[in-house]
Image (cartoon, rainbow, N blue to C red):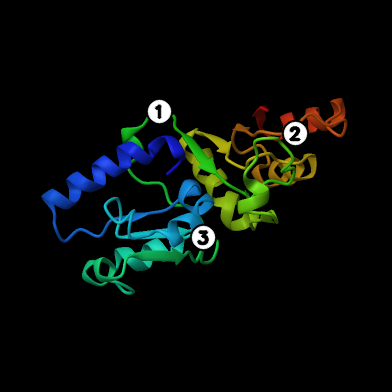
Amino acid sequence: LHAGQVIPAACVSIIAKQIWPEVLVVWGGPHVTGLGDAVAADVEKRSFAADMFVVGHAEETFVDLLQRKKISRAESVSRPGVLNGRRGPTLPPVFENLHLYDNPPTLPAQTTLGCAFGRCAFCTYPALEPTPKKLPLLYALDSVADEACSLGASIAIKDSLATPLRLQEIAACVAGRAKWSACTKLSNKLDSPTLKDLSSRGLATL
């Protein structure tokens, strides 16, 4: 969830509980993470919206909850609370049902958690993810580039802002197998030879 999704999500949660009384409703994402302390301090007041609130990166936590290994709805209703998420290992992304999307598709890939810059006036990264973390390109990007190549697809790099060095690392990994796009900040390190090199290895939109 981001802030703009909270009210509609609360409506969906309330309706879901009316239709399926045993459903376990779990909220997570940047809004919940940013308000983690406030949610924890008054979790009973927010229990109408969700049974559990998960803070931080929580891929492994959500898998645990879906498999009901860690908690049942009955337990959560008796003691609603906030869970600190567990991210788990970096795994190659899997894309399914691509026939439902535009052809050729654009496949997302994320190679960095957090933001290497983190200096924008409105930025929440310093508070939520103060230390950027590079993900192994072998798992985060290489298989995506292979699949994009086989599908004739493009790749959208979802990193918040990629540094010039990270752009070069991404370019070396993609190695022209597919067109790709990324976001960055203006930098005099992005000179003409560097941009030409990135373009020769697949960078189409920056």
**Answer yes or no: do the residues labelled 1 and 2 have beta carbons within 8 Å?**
no
Crowd tier of the residue under label 3, counting other residues whose Cα lies within 10 Å: few below 14, some 14–19, many 20 or above = few
| Amino acid type at mark 1 | Asn
- Element type at mark 2: helix
In the picture of the structure, the residue carrying the numbered disc 1 is 103
- Element type at mark 1: loop
Residue located 31% across and 34% down the image: 100
Name the N-terminal-most of marks 3 and 1. 3
**Pair 2/3: label in front:** 3
- The disc placed on residue 91 is 3
Spatial distance from mark 2 to mark 3, Cα to Cα?
A: 26 Å
Q: Is residue 32 visible?
A: yes
Spatial distance from mark 3 to mark 1, Cα to Cα?
A: 25 Å
| Amino acid type at mark 2 | Leu
Left or right placement of residue 131 versus residue 101 in this view: right
Tell me the quarter of the image containing the N terminus: top left
In the picture of the structure, the residue carrying the numbered disc 2 is 198
Left or right placement of residue 16 versus residue 92 in this view: left
